[in-house]
Image: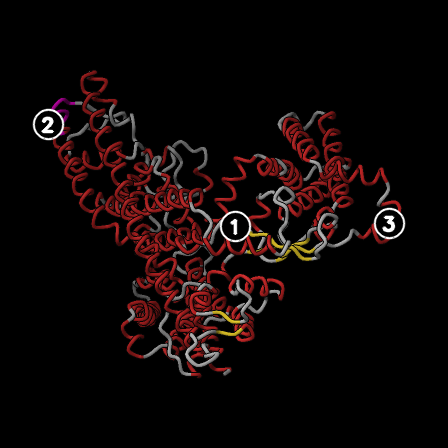
Amino acid sequence: MLQDMDLAAVYVSDAQYNRNIFFDTTPQAVRLYLLYNHWVPQVLLYVFITVDLFLAIFEEPALHEVSLWATMPVELLCLSVFTVRIVHYAKVIPRDKFWKDPKNICIIIILLLTLLDMIIYGALTASSLYAVRWSRVLRPLLLVNITEGRQLRRAFRSIRNALPQIFYVFLLFMFSLLMFSLMALKLFGKRGLTTIDERPYFTNYLDIVFDLYVLVTTANSPDVMMPAYNASNFFAVFFIVYILINTYIFMSVFLAVVYNNYKKYLKEEVRQLVRAKRHKMVRAFAVLQERREEGAEPAVSQACWNQLVRRVQPDISTAHRELLWSVSDDKNQGWIGKVAFVQLADLLNIQVITLKSRPHPLQNLLPTLYQSGPSRLLRRMVQHRGFVILYDLIILVNAVFIGLDETDPLIAYAEWVFLALYLLEILLKLYAFEPRAFFSRHNFWNWFDTIIVISALIATIINTMESLGRYTSRQILDIVFILRVLRLVRVVDSIKRFRIIINTLIKIGPTILTFGQLIIVVYYIFAMVGMELFKGKVQFSAADIGNLQRDCGNPLLKNTAFARLNYCKNNFNDVVSSFILLVELTVVNQWHVLTTGFTDVTHKSARIFFVLFHIVVVIIIINIFVAFVLEAFFMEYSVEKSDLQTSLEKKIEELELAVAQEQLEENLVDAMETSDNDLGTGQSAKKKHTLMFKIASKSKKQNTMFS
């Protein structure tokens, strides 16, 4: 029975977290699978992946150079951990399934190639021969292919699925680019025009192709047009038509194609996830089902169901579990059939806040004083909406004072007045609301206000004491300024329109982080390649700052736009500088100047690296990200409550355990709640129950679609 319960718990857990793994169902394999999915080995895996990626900081070309024989053992330890993890996974699933899974093959190949590269690189370095660490580009691919990286793999699948359609549009775009470049060569090549640098204007076909490609990104507009425009107003028509067709039409078509393909394949992935979830739940039911009597349909008893839920979600409260059972067994039969059982994973995914009503400590210590007329009036005033509006106005007035001259004594004294008002606000709220409710785990804004005000008070006191000693700490003063400005953030939560946007961003935040991982993977690969291609070609020196004759450590850059604009620090001499440079290239502005700088010190073929980066990141990945954000916002605003969620809300109201909506208006704090919160005295006075419930989010369907 225990083995069956473990197996059923694994099925339900997989359905709850959308894991689609065909594991072996033997008792030993199930125990290994439970260990494999435990949070400790998963956290350790991510720690070692992070360490492996961060080794680039200490490897040549290094930000902080460390001996090769110090980094090699660390990398070998990381490879050992990855090997143990993949062997563990091989013990969990059937052998034929393991070798048919591409991600497992990919991990094994990465580990073997990395080990081979380490041996070759170490031997060549020991022999004082030139060597390249080519396997470093493979490191971020581990993040994609580990079992826990399924969300990242879905993002890559979105890109892969969109590539065929993007390719056809890109071919048309390139045809247009090449045609316009040929026209530009014939129009301007023989007119003797020159650029501002006294270089021939549009005389080399490949240079024209590159300049017009840059013009699509608007980075060199209107500079690239000016020589022709100065010669004749008529030539401006050429560039206007080119921008209209290639920048506004083709770039929009790219986004439309990506968005359309993203939606199409997203729907198919959702269907597959739903089918896999139902399949897992049906198998769990098959393991636990029992027949109540001859000829009756199979069912699961309440005792068995309770035991299963405790195994799947050990931290669930008894009250919450009983609430979920009452929804599943709506007829109070003491058992549920297959249809009701299959809904368990979705029920567990619905976020329910359990609220506890507690008396205020002053009500126990000084009941007469706390329940007196003036005390009740003060508490009602603090709990009133007008109190919030008053302090929002105070924060806005404070913002005006922040922008004024800090050296004015009146402004300095005013800061103490604002600090006193903020401290008074916190004390009044602690008097009106039960302290444990005020500082509950997920009461974000209360924690935010208190930390900001107390930190600002301490920093201001320290700064004032140092000022009296005729010395002002610049660092402390900077902290004071930052803390003052951060207070303005709280006003955002008071404006309903802002709150809706913030709530939506919070709900889609975890999946936005997935695209953050995707960007890191791509950046890391391009950074490693860029470091090998361009390391040492551009040097930064403090002496270059303000030096009009700077050449960024390379005579080939003297008198170039790259050197004149003081871009010397934009180089591939270490991984941090490389990442910063790639961010600048992603922003696009001036990316052609950065590109030209590196082509000047190498060869014009270096443009391929930068154009390829622009195509992969800006045209493909950024458009995928925009498509995701658009769809996520549409879903957040349009998805209605599921039938299960509606049933759960009805059951809460039926049991008279619902929290009044006007008492808990949904805001950023509610969006950040998970399972437990305190209600304080305001609600307890109106409800006879010590426990009440509230649905925390609109629907869990979004998380299924975008996870």
Where are the magenta residues, as a range? 185-192
Q: Which residue is mark 3?
A: 367
Q: Nearer the viewer, residue 458 or 678?
A: 678
Reply yes or no: does residue 187 show up in magenta. yes
Q: Which residue is mark 1?
A: 697
| In the displayed structure image, the side of residue 467 where residue 90 appears, left or right | left
Q: Which-is-in-front pick, marks 1 and 2?
A: 1
Q: Amino acid at mark 1?
A: Ser
Q: Amino acid at mark 3?
A: Pro
| In the displayed structure image, the side of residue 302 where residue 546 appears, left or right | left
Image position, residue 390 (x, y; %) = 69, 31
Q: Secondary structure at mark 3?
A: helix
Q: Residue at x 32, y 70 (%)?
A: 104
Q: Residue at x 45, y 79 (%)?
A: 291
| In the displayed structure image, the side of residue 102 where residue 24 appears, left or right | right
Task: Residue 389: tell me if it is visible.
Answer: yes
Image position, residue 69 (x, y; %) = 43, 69
